Amino acid sequence: MAKIESLKNYIGVLNEDEFIKLSKQIYDITDFICEDYPKHKEWYFQKQIPRIFTPSGEILFARSEEDENKIIAMACLKKDEEEQKICTLYVSDQCRGQHLGTRMVEASMEFLGTTKPLITLADYKLPMFQPIIEKYDWELTEVVSGLYNDRAKELCFNGKLTKDVNLEQSGLTLTKKPRK
């Protein structure tokens, strides 16, 4: 079982070059999401990495058991007075279905101090996240068009990113499947 680690734990342990290398390895598994979030790379290196040097930020990650240089999951977290947010959550395709996503979410909620963190995702990714959304009874609270790109609506759970957006006006609903 892959161990979930904190990038914060490597501050002052790794030299600067090694820390940058590890930070980049963690980023690299999410580079493709720049298609949906065009400023993802800029945000990660200019906002999220500096944030982990404060109490409000965290980056969790897991390495492959076979190859410790291969990152297989990551979560970027933000915790301040205004929001407790899972900013990015990703598990490599080959590791899905092994409860790593659940473990990442649980570690994220522990850091954030809530079981109802703000999390957003593109509408077309809803089927991928549906099991976690249902497991933790997260509530769809906002749907925003054009937030990060013009191709998808951004679904917000457990909080809002904008003001004065009416969920009913979005035309989107979340149907819960009966629990077995």
Image (spheres, helix red, strand yellow):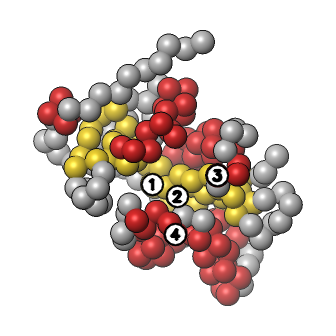
The tag on residue 93 is 3
Between discs 3 and 2, the one toward the N terminus? 2
Residue type for callout 1: Cys
User: Which residue corresponds to mark 1?
Assistant: 87
Distance, label 3 to label 4, CA atoms, is 14 Å
**Residue at left offset 67%, top offset 87%:** 17
Secondary-structure class at tag 4: helix
Residue type for callout 4: Asp
Looking at the rendered image, the disc whose residue lies closer to the viewer, 4 or 1, is 4
User: Which residue corresponds to mark 4?
Assistant: 31
Looking at the rendered image, the disc whose residue lies closer to the viewer, 2 or 4, is 4
**Residue at left offset 22%, top offset 55%:** 146
Residue type for callout 2: Cys
Among the 4 quarters of the image, the one containing residue 168: top left
Of all residues, the one furthest to the bottom in this rendering is 17
Judged left or right of residue 19, residue 168 is: left
Distance, label 1 to label 3, CA atoms, is 19 Å
Residue type for callout 3: Asp
Looking at the rendered image, the disc whose residue lies closer to the viewer, 1 or 3, is 3
Distance, label 2 to label 4, CA atoms, is 14 Å
Q: Cβ–Cβ below 8 Å for labels 2 and 1? A: yes
User: Which residue corresponds to mark 2?
Assistant: 76
Between discs 4 and 1, the one toward the N terminus? 4
**Residue at left offset 47%, top offset 49%:** 86
Quarter of the image where the C terminus is located? top right
Q: Depth check: give the residue in front, 11 or 121.
A: 121
Among the 4 quarters of the image, the one containing residue 98: top right
